[in-house]
Amino acid sequence: MNELARYLDRAGRRYDAEKLLVESIPILEMKRNEEPVAYLLGLNHYATYLFRLRDFDRAQALLEKMLDWTPVAKKEAHRRIISLAEYLPVMEVAGRIHLATLFLEIEALPEAETTLNQAEQGLALLNRIQREECEHGFWGVQSLWFIKAGQIERAEAVCQKIRDQGSSFYLRARTKIHLARHEYAAAESLLLPAMAGAISGKATRPEHLELLLLYAEALFGQAVYKNAWTMVEFACVHIAYHGIPRDAFWHQTVESWLRRATKLGNLEATKLLERELQKIPVATAQGITILENLRAIAKRP
């Protein structure tokens, strides 16, 4: 059921996917002692799904459960005839990479840095094949951390380590580096191949919201205003289509583009963004509360 949910999600059947994810986790939890890897994978799949929908509260709870259970699973794995110990460190590293990404999204840079350090320590313990499987994600998130910290040169150095230049990690990091350097044409060129999926009906996915906004920035930086406003309009449709929460991030984004529309005297864009602003709840929280036991996990040596 959990694997089928991943397929349905990729096929654009998000609500069907979530039903299966919700139903599969309790089943996997009942068998977590016998099948710890399946249970941890299930938690990871569901957390990733929720993260892409910007549902950070529930995603955090699942990642927390995943990281809490991994040490227990390691102990159980050594008692079994067929040891699962070799798989569990990979899952722990992946969980920390996802958690660091979550912290970045809510602007919790110190927690993201600490969690990345934990992931890096875990990477050093993996064998070569396992390390190669995880390190591109690690480098991608580390590069994004440096970008948010304003350290563009260090972000560039880390981004160059990512060999798979078709990965989402590389695309996001490289695009943001271009935008930070005001290399708008280069950012547009990099994003262009991904834009077809971001704006074409059932091929669109929740995580495409960021691509739409980055592409709008690249166009706006080149004074291609008409196309930039079209991308912003697509982003508004995207929010509604996927049921993505109109949170503090979206509130800030809409206000930023509204100021631009007002300054340029674009009445059509101004009206669109004012309507969108009215749909945002008055009390929007900036992400989630970082639970104390997660802070403890991040600080462990």
Image (tube, rainbow, N blue to C red):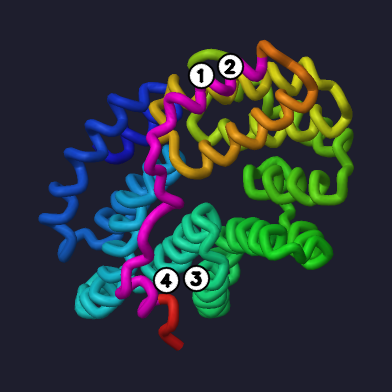
* Crowd around label 1: few <14 · some 14–19 · many ≥20 (10 Å): few
Residue 89: which numbered mark, if any? 4
Residue 272: which numbered mark, if any? 2
Residue 289 in picture, x, y percent from top left: 36, 61
Q: Is residue 154 above or below residue 252?
A: below
Q: What is the magenta range?
A: 269-297
Residue 229 in picture, x, y percent from top left: 71, 20
Residue 41 horizontal side relative to residue 161, left or right: left
Q: Name the residue at the bottom extreme.
A: 301
Question: Between marks 2 and 4, how big is the CA–CA gap?
Answer: 48 Å
What amino acid type should be assigned to the residue bearing mark 4?
Answer: Pro
Residue under the image location 76 percent in, 62 percent down: 155
Please report whichever mark, 3 or 2, sits nearer to the chain's N-terminal start: 3
The answer to whether marks 3 and 2 mark residues whose Cβ atoms lie closer than 8 Å is no
Question: Between marks 1 and 2, how big is the CA–CA gap?
Answer: 5 Å
Location of the N terminus by quadrant is top left
* Crowd around label 4: few <14 · some 14–19 · many ≥20 (10 Å): some
Magenta stretch encompasses residue 91? no
The residue identified by callout 1 is 275
Residue 29 in picture, x, y percent from top left: 16, 55
Location of the C terminus by quadrant is bottom left
Question: Between marks 4 and 3, how big is the CA–CA gap?
Answer: 21 Å
Question: Between marks 3 and 1, how big is the CA–CA gap?
Answer: 35 Å
